[in-house]
Amino acid sequence: MPPAARRFTRAELLRYHGATVDDFSGDEVRLLFVGINPGLWTAAVNAHFARPGNRFWPALHRAGITPWQVDASSGMQPADVEMLHARGIGISNIAPTASARADELTADDLVHGAARLEATVARLRPRAVAVLGLTAYRQAFHRPKAIAGRQEETLAGTALWVLPNPSGLNAHETVDSLAIAYAAAARAAGLEVASDAR
């Protein structure tokens, strides 16, 4: 049972502005999820998509990508780390530094982050990459007409998907719609997913 979620004051979280968060990867990454940049809560606990209310972990569980719903709000638990490594799930970001909102990033932050991400993908060599955020992808990779879904181009030779961001600020998406989108990339990476995550 994970510990109860930590609670942070706004002032405590603001101290993490500009902090970096470690990429999450095991020995073999099959599917690399890529956020835009870490939020302040994520930086505070050094665990991706940690803010309570973020729909990333519920969507992964709904899709059957994970056998249980990870609660990263107080940091990643050892059983979660072991399970994600065994499943071949990795997590990175386009820009590595934390901010309260992704729209605080500059165009240069995204472009420099894209080069960093390409190097990360070349090093990890996953079967598929899923960038979670269409607008950020368009800006970072100079693809203004890109649409969501599987991309014609690859990233460092790896099959590339651009999928919806799980932030609660992305009001157009639900856990169910995110699960369907994420399951498509997981299938491309050779992962088993829930049969109803179409």
Image: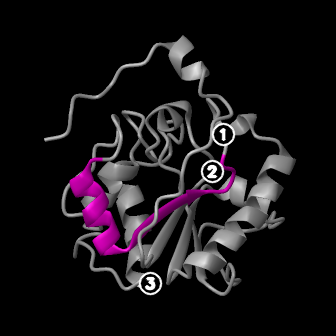
Q: Earlier in the sequence, mark 3 or mark 1?
A: 1
Specify the color scheme: one colour
User: Which residue sits at x=70%, y=60%?
Assistant: 137
Cα gap from disc 2 to disc 1, whole angstroms? 7 Å
Q: According to the image, label 3 marks what residue? A: 188
Q: Earlier in the sequence, mark 3 or mark 2?
A: 2
Range drawn in magenta = 77-96
Residue 158 image point, x, y percent: 60, 84
Q: Is residue 187 visible?
A: yes
Q: Nearer the viewer, residue 105 or 145?
A: 105
Residue 127 image point, x, y percent: 50, 84
Left or right of 108, for residue 17: left
Say whether marks 2 and 1 touch (CB < 8 Å). Answer: yes
Q: Is residue 198 visible?
A: no
Q: What kind of element bears circle 2?
A: loop
Residue 55 falls in image quadrant: top left
Q: Nearer the viewer, residue 39 or 23?
A: 23
Residue 144 image point, x, y percent: 81, 63
Cα gap from disc 3 to disc 2, whole angstroms? 21 Å
Say whether marks 3 and 2 touch (CB < 8 Å). Answer: no
Q: According to the image, label 2 marks what residue? A: 36
Q: Nearer the viewer, residue 96 or 166?
A: 96
The kind of residue on which mark 2 rests is Ile
Q: According to the image, label 1 marks what residue? A: 102
The kind of residue on which mark 3 rests is Ala
Q: Nearer the viewer, residue 87 or 159?
A: 87
Position of 174 relative to 145 (above/below)? above
Mark 1 Cα-neighbour bin, 10 Å: few <14, some 14–19, many ≥20? some
